[in-house]
Image: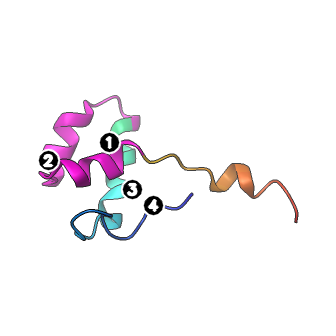
Amino acid sequence: MIIPIRCFTCGKPISEYYEKFINEIKTNKDAKKVLNDLGIKRYCCRRMLLSHVDLIDDIMKYKR
């Protein structure tokens, strides 16, 4: 739902890169190049950004 603050595997803070990553991807840039430009080198951290699915907007539609 919400991007985790830290990588589950190594503990590096990754939430600060999420908005920059999404904005660059929306402008049709290559994900590999964007991650390299942001300085994300570990494959565990790259996985966290690449595989995240933002569901908060879909869940907010429903009441308890």
SS for dot 2: helix
Name the spot of residue 31 as percent of width and height, x first.
26, 35
Q: Which residues are magenta?
A: 26-51
Q: Are marks 2 and 1 in contact (CB under 8 Å)?
A: yes
Q: Amino acid at mark 1?
A: Glu
- Is 17 contained in the magenta span? no
Residue located at (12% from left, 54% from top): 39
How far apart are labels 3 and 1 at the CA level?
Answer: 9 Å
How far apart are labels 3 and 4 at the CA level?
Answer: 10 Å
Q: Within the image, what quadrant is residue 5 found in?
A: bottom left
Q: Which mark is residue 3?
A: 4
Graded by Cα atoms within 10 Å as few (under 14), some (14 to 19) or many (20 or more), the crowding at tag 4 reads some
How far apart are labels 3 and 2 at the CA level?
Answer: 14 Å
Residue located at (30% from left, 46% from top): 47
How far apart are labels 2 and 1 at the CA level?
Answer: 10 Å
Q: Which mark is residue 2?
A: none
Q: Which residue is mark 2?
A: 37
Residue located at (30% from left, 59% from top): 17
Q: Are marks 3 and 1 in contact (CB under 8 Å)?
A: no
Residue 27 drawn above or below residue 13: above
Q: Which residue is mark 1?
A: 24
Of mark 3 and mark 2, the one earlier in the sequence is 3
Residue located at (18% from left, 47% from top): 43
Q: Which residue is mark 3?
A: 19
Of mark 3 and mark 4, the one earlier in the sequence is 4
The mark closer to the camera, 4 or 2, is: 4
Q: Main secondary structure of the magenta part?
A: helix
SS for dot 4: loop
Q: How many marks?
A: 4
